Amino acid sequence: MLVVTPGQTMNVLLKTKPYSPSTTFLMAARPHVTGPATFDNSTTVGLLQYKTKKGRHYISPPASSNFSFIMPSLPAFNDTNPVTNFSMKLRSLASEQFPAKVPLKVDMRFFFTVGLGTRPCASNQTCQGPNGSMLSAAVNNISFVLPTTALLQAHYSGQSAGVYKPDFPSQPLIPFNYTGTPPNNTVVIKDTKVVVLKCNTSVELVMQDTGILGAESHPFHLHGFNFFVVGQGVGNYDPINDPANFNLVDPVERNTYSVPSGGWTAIRFLADNPGAWLMHCHLDIHLSWGLGMAWVVLDGELPGQKLQPPPSDLPKCWS
Ligand SMILES: [Cu+2]
């Protein structure tokens, strides 16, 4: 069984057993859902068959549909246990010779809440949120607003004023019981804030799902870097006891990872790629509601640590 989250990529080595050139294999897939969304819960199937040609084996659709097969049993669409078991099982391909490059020393620690919230509904609109409010989403209660001038352009030209603010909070301004009784005020702030990092900062980030409007898994994607998933758990992250269980030996390396529903994920990455990098939930509707933020990584001292100029033929649409 394989679990792929929205936006995630995976290299898979398929081993069929027992091997026989005439065997047809059935593959089946269905959605996994943690939120309240309505969705197509049907199961899709595909077939693969080995053919032998000049001593080589390759995969092709079966020539005839005249065969019977056994439908694999798939977990229920809302069963999170197989998903957790699968994601916890994955390890890096690290070996003694090629150890995982997970940062062992941390320069900066961040704790981000990720989840849904509300905004006041405009008077001329009908909104779907609780008590007629507008559904929104936020990281540390800040609902990300995409600026009209590109972040990278503003950063590169040194004209970030009016485009983004460099004061994205490193932790929630008002801590609360993230997965417990929701706070009375669910209203989020709309803004364009970033975290500014010196080049080669090693970052540890804990992303904590909130149950403010119901817990839900959020597949977070980081541009510009791969990160290592050093820990995850259910409920509220415990900064005293949970780090002791972090995997700093062979953690899986990713650029997209689902923060578990009502739980948390801890990642580490080395910010060695100068530029402006979005990090956002890969559920498109959540992104449109503001579930993201950005990291701006400054140039370093060495020649290989400089943001490259835009290509000479970059279309000029500077605002
Ligand atoms: Cu999401």
Image (tube, rainbow, N blue to C red):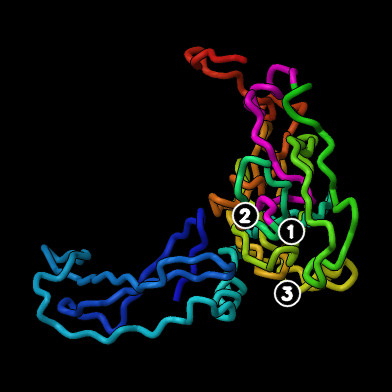
Q: Secondary structure at mark 3?
A: strand
Q: Residue furthest front?
A: 124
Does 249 lie within the magenta span?
Answer: no
Residue 112 location, x and y as percent? Answer: 78, 54
Tag 1 secondary structure: strand
Q: Check mark 2 vs ligand 1: CB closer than 8 Å? yes or no.
A: yes
**Residue 115, image x and y in percent?**
70, 58
Real-space Cα separation, disc 3 to disc 2, in angstroms: 17 Å
Q: CA distance from mark 1 to mark 2?
A: 9 Å
Residue under pointer 1: 207
Given residues 18 and 28, the one toward you in this image is 28
- Apparent side of residue 72 relative to residue 195 in the rendered image (left or right): left
The span picked out in magenta is: 132-159
Residue type, numbered disc 3 = Val
List the residue tagged with mark 3: 234
Which residue carries the number 2 mark? 220
